[in-house]
Image (cartoon, rainbow, N blue to C red):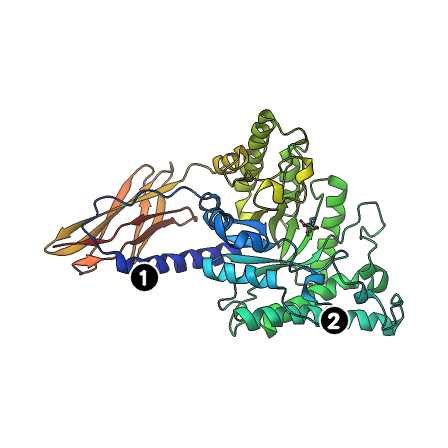
């Protein structure tokens, strides 16, 4: 599936344009070389979106700074789950923490990965009860009640989010949703499905219905006119790194696809430990690679065990590196890779030992360095300098093909686009852009190869006296 990559590029181009506008106020002397490289964020090293689960605490202060530096997608750790949408009177409203996350994403141009529409946990008990508080039966009438509740919930969520933040596909930062979560059984049930209240009352049909309602709500009713299915619909589960559970997951996904159910993506939670060989993570992703779905690592965390020693932290760094190498090698299949929390004490698995990428003072752990180091050497680079020619600024953009084989490249600057075809391995090409101004604001130039390798660099404002 190529859709996610295209979305990512569009957002990146949008942020380049924003950079130009902001820079307009900063015109100064002629800049020689490119601006100093900002510290590399995880998101700048990954060909898939880099995500993190957050709540309101991470939307301000130092935590917010670290989130925006390293991640380009956020998941609400708890506040978009079914029970978060209802107040004590069972009235649907957006949870203030979910609202804070949407505002944060809007402000910082982050995507939001919704979690989750239909689950057996963190769901109001009344979903599965009659008006008098009795459990719904499996009668046709009670089944119709639960179907309608599911539909009302999903449409209500889509309506609230779109009223607040825009139609999907037209500025709303929400681009994906876990439609159903953890529907696969841990034991060997004949159909491989968890015996939840959803399952007891509706059977396997509840999964089909959840996707059909979500597709109608997010990708039709509350989608921008002309937007092409702007919200990617995921199924999500844990222990997909274990063969037996994965076989049940794959069988369900195949049944859904065969029935034409609009499932776009398969999520792997990957709440693992260091004793799980990363080859098991590779097998989980590879199992779905030839199915017509994208995939996501949705909730990655890897505790060190106790006590948390420096040796364990180093071993964890090696684990994160190996895991991210697995993900990089499967980039064409991955919509995003998300960690389940920012810093260790915020993790739901904190007691198992320091599972995440950042220490509690928000400094980088060996785990983050490992994830960063997994990025393959870039296959293309770009540098920019400015000079004055007859009183006008000229930008000279030099692109280098670092790969061994020839590449065709596109060079994008605020003053236009240029192409070079069949640039031999190791060779550079320079393009001059003359904006015909005596001064220009700072901005960003980017180079992209035909097979999607990407590099960009900022340059400072420049003026000719
Ligand atoms: C967890 C949260 O991290 C906790 O704060 C909360 O108390 C329980 O839920 N699988 C999921 C997530 O899909 O929603 C869970 O998140 C972790 C397991």
- Disc 1 versus disc 2: nearer the observer: 2
For the N terminus, give its image quadrant: bottom right
Q: Which residue is mark 2?
A: 89
Quick one: which residue is furthest to the top in this view? 311
Q: CA distance from mark 1 to mark 2?
A: 46 Å
Q: Which residue is mark 1?
A: 21
Residue 5 appears in the picture as rendered: yes
Which class describes the residues within 10 Å of circle 1: few (<14), some (14-19), or many (20+)?
Answer: some
For label 2, being within 8 Å of ligand 1 is answered no
Q: Residue at x 72, y 62 (%)?
A: 83
Which class describes the residues within 10 Å of circle 2: few (<14), some (14-19), or many (20+)?
Answer: few
Q: Residue at x 80, y 61 (%)?
A: 198
Where is residue 462? Give x, y as percent. 21, 53
| Left or right: where 292 falls relative to 207 | left
Where is residue 170? Give x, y as percent. 49, 69
- Residue 397 vs 324, above or below: the answer is below
Secondary structure under tag 2 reads: loop
């Amino acid at each position: 599936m190529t859709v996610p990559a295209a979305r990512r590029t569009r957002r990146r181009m949008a942020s380049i344009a924003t950079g130009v506008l902001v820079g307009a106020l900063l015109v100064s002397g002629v800049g020689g070389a490119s601006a100093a490289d900002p510290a590399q964020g995880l998101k700048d090293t990954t060909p898939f979106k880099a995500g993190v689960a957050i709540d309101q605490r991470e939307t301000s202060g130092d935590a917010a700074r670290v989130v925006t530096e390293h991640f380009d997608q956020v998941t609400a750790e708890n506040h978009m789950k079914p029970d978060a949408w209802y107040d004590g009177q069972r009235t649907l409203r957006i949870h203030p923490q979910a609202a804070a996350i949407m505002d944060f994403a809007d402000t910082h141009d982050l995507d939001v990965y919704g979690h989750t529409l239909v689950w057996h946990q963190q769901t109001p008990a009344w979903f599965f009860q009659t008006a008098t508080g009795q459990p719904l039966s499996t009668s046709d009438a009670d089944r119709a009640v639960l179907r309608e509740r599911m539909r009302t919930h999903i449409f209500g969520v889509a309506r609230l989010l779109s009223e607040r933040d825009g139609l999907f596909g037209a500025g709303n930062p929400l681009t994906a949703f876990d439609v159903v979560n953890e529907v696969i059984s841990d034991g060997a049930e004949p159909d491989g499905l968890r015996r939840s209240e959803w399952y007891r009352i509706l059977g396997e049909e509840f999964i089909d219905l959840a996707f059909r309602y979500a597709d109608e709500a997010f990708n039709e009713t509350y989608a921008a006119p002309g937007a092409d299915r702007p919200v990617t619909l995921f199924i999500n589960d844990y222990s997909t790194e274990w063969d037996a559970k994965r076989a049940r997951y794959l069988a369900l996904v195949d049944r859904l696809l065969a029935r034409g159910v609009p499932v776009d993506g398969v999520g792997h939670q990957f709440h693992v430990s260091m004793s799980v060989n990363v080859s098991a993570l590779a097998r989980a992703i590879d199992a779905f690679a030839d199915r017509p779905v994208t995939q996501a690592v949705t909730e990655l965390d890897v505790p060190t065990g106790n006590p948390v020693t420096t040796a364990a932290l180093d071993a964890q760094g090696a684990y994160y590196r190996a895991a991210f190498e697995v993900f990089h090698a499967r980039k064409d299949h991955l919509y995003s890779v998300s960690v389940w929390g920012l810093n260790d004490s915020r993790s739901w698995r904190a007691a198992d030992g320091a599972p995440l990428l950042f220490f509690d003072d928000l400094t980088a752990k060996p785990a983050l360095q490992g994830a960063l180091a997994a990025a393959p050497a870039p296959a293309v680079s770009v540098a920019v300098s400015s000079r004055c020619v007859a009183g006008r600024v000229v930008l000279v953009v030099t692109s280098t093909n670092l790969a061994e084989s020839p590449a065709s490249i596109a060079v994008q600057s605020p003053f236009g686009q240029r192409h070079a075809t069949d640039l031999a391995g190791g060779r550079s090409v320079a393009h001059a852009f003359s904006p015909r101004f005596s001064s220009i604001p700072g901005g960003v130039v980017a180079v992209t190869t035909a097979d999607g390798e990407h590099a960009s660099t900022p340059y400072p404002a420049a003026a000719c006296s």
